[in-house]
Image (spheres, grey):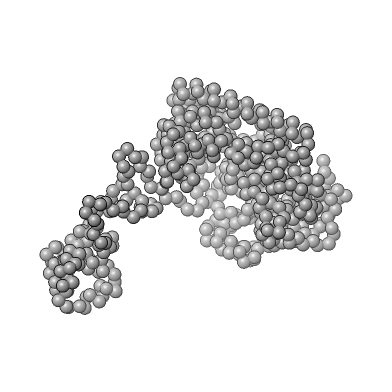
Amino acid sequence: MWLSRRGLPGVLGLWCYALQRPSFARTWSGYKGPMAETLSTQVGTTGGLKALHQQNGDASGDAMVEPPPEAPKPAGQEVEPAPVCGEHASTAAQGPGKRRKRRGATGERVVPPPKKRRTGVSFGDEHFAETSYYFEGGLRKVRPYYFDFRTYCKGRWVGHSLLHVFSTEFRAQPLAYYEAAIRAGRLHLNEEPVQDLSIVLKDNDFLRNTVHRHEPPVTAEPIHLLAENEDVVVVDKPSSIPVHPCGRFRHNTVIFILGKEHQLKELHPLHRLDRLTSGVLMFAKTAAVSERIHEQVRDRQLEKEYVCRVEGEFPTEEVTCKEPILVVSYKVGVCRVDPQGKPCETVFQRLSYNGHSSVVQCRPLTGRTHQIRVHLQFLGHPILNDPIYNSAAWGPSRGRGGHIPKTDEELLRDLVAEHQAKQSLDVLDLCEGDLSSGLTDSTAPSSELGKDNLEELAAVAQKIEEVVEAVPQDLDTLALAPEKAIETDVMNQETDPLCAECRLVRQDPLPQDLVMFLHALRYKGPGFEYFSPMPAWAQDDWQED
């Protein structure tokens, strides 16, 4: 009765599915009942178990077997198949041994499945060869180069046109720039040239935008190797150089300099130092070593010691600061003491005092962002040349005791305005494009900055606007001969007709302006201890200029 209700084909399907399960196969091998005889007879007539595998869409006889049949579909009604995720999204079984590509409705744009990304460190010779360095005025500089920004469509972009996305989230360039970039073949969607900014984005769309990239200069001081063995590389990082690519920095980073000049590749940073902080920096050579030392970090087995020079006469006795720290803005990179912040602790001990400033030993017992700098500001002894936490933007007391007479929004606005006026937005890991994308309110800065700074800020802003406004006129002429323009780009990477940055004349920073008086002096852990030399500004006989 049960067999007649199910039908022999359905029973065979269930039986083949069950035989893939070892426990059932072992049980069935010893069973000699009438059902076994019936099924064995049917299998014999169809060419054995291999033929049954082929009927279920697997000609190879491997373990890809269809699950038991679902309830029958209503006549004349198509049932939407369950969505397939990840790398298999474009391949669903279609008959014996075949796979089919996803197809949309007639005239609908088809989105290919996302590609697998290589996990872990991914910088190699092809990346290091993108451009080269040159040295000038005590600075390490990167020759401008072409670079592909790549991204998958973000959830908030789905259903919006490229025009909408560029006009709302990428306002660093005028729309005329993106229109010219299309004509020059620099915008790609799923590796096909974009023809029209009105195209509507879908989930898993892959965008590639070729840009002419400029990097800020860093100090020309070399990166000295302090130690190297089969497990780790330890260097003395100069101030002003980021550890790894971020923001506008790529080749002017420790990772790229070590790869290009020391042939040290595929390194894993074991900790991070702020861009302006110098001193001991450790890298693991393998993922296993990286995980082992990170485990030690999580277990608080690492001891870190810093040295800095601060404003005024620091107390002679040991000072412990346990004030919690709150991140004001991740994008700008600003923190402050706040009861709602994360708990942290730093121990300070004065080493010397020269009548104007003090050299202080710092031992952070936790690892919060800007912890040493924020605690010193709270104590009323900010680092002497800290461009963020010793700024007038914090008010008359400069954040001492946590007293900040303005809102977080006003603080960020004033910090940005101050560094924009000085053409030093890189200190905040920002560029002008970040401001136009809605980082801060477009209201006037507060009065703490002073009239001179505001006038300088206005002059800088006007100069930038003039350059950006001038670019679209040239972009229109580019459409007349895009092939010629692209050929020119390849021949001369250092200038580009679409690049507004090429037309800006920026004043280089002085090498001394790239140094902050905070240095990682010592790192100690189970079985290792590394030191770097005491910097010149921490010597007892050092005098301010």
* Left or right relative to 117: residue 457: right
Instruction: Note whether residue 372 is visible.
Output: no
> Between 433 and 73, which is closer to the camera in this rendering?
73
Residue 414, x across and y down, in percent: 71, 41
Q: Is residue 236 above or below residue 322?
A: above
Q: Is residue 264 above or below residue 291?
A: above
Instruction: Note whether residue 120 is visible.
Output: yes
Residue shown at 74% from the left, 34% from the top: 454
Total numbered badges shown on the rendered structure: 0
The quarter of the rendered structure image containing the C terminus is top right
Residue 96, x across and y down, in percent: 22, 54
> Between 24 and 59, which is closer to the camera in this rendering?
24
Q: Quadrant of residue 2?
A: bottom left
The quarter of the rendered structure image containing the N terminus is bottom left
> Between 376 and 71, which is closer to the camera in this rendering?
71
* Left or right relative to 395: residue 282: left
> Between 317 and 283, which is closer to the camera in this rendering?
317
Residue shown at 70% from the left, 38% from the top: 417
Q: Is residue 327 above or below residue 168?
A: below
Residue 83, x across and y down, in percent: 35, 53
Residue 419, x across and y down, in percent: 70, 39
Q: Among all residues in the image, which is located at the extreme right? A: 355
Q: Is residue 198 above or below residue 236?
A: above
Residue shown at 51% from the left, 25% from the top: 475
Residue shown at 71% from the left, 59% from the top: 339
Q: Quadrant of residue 337?
A: bottom right
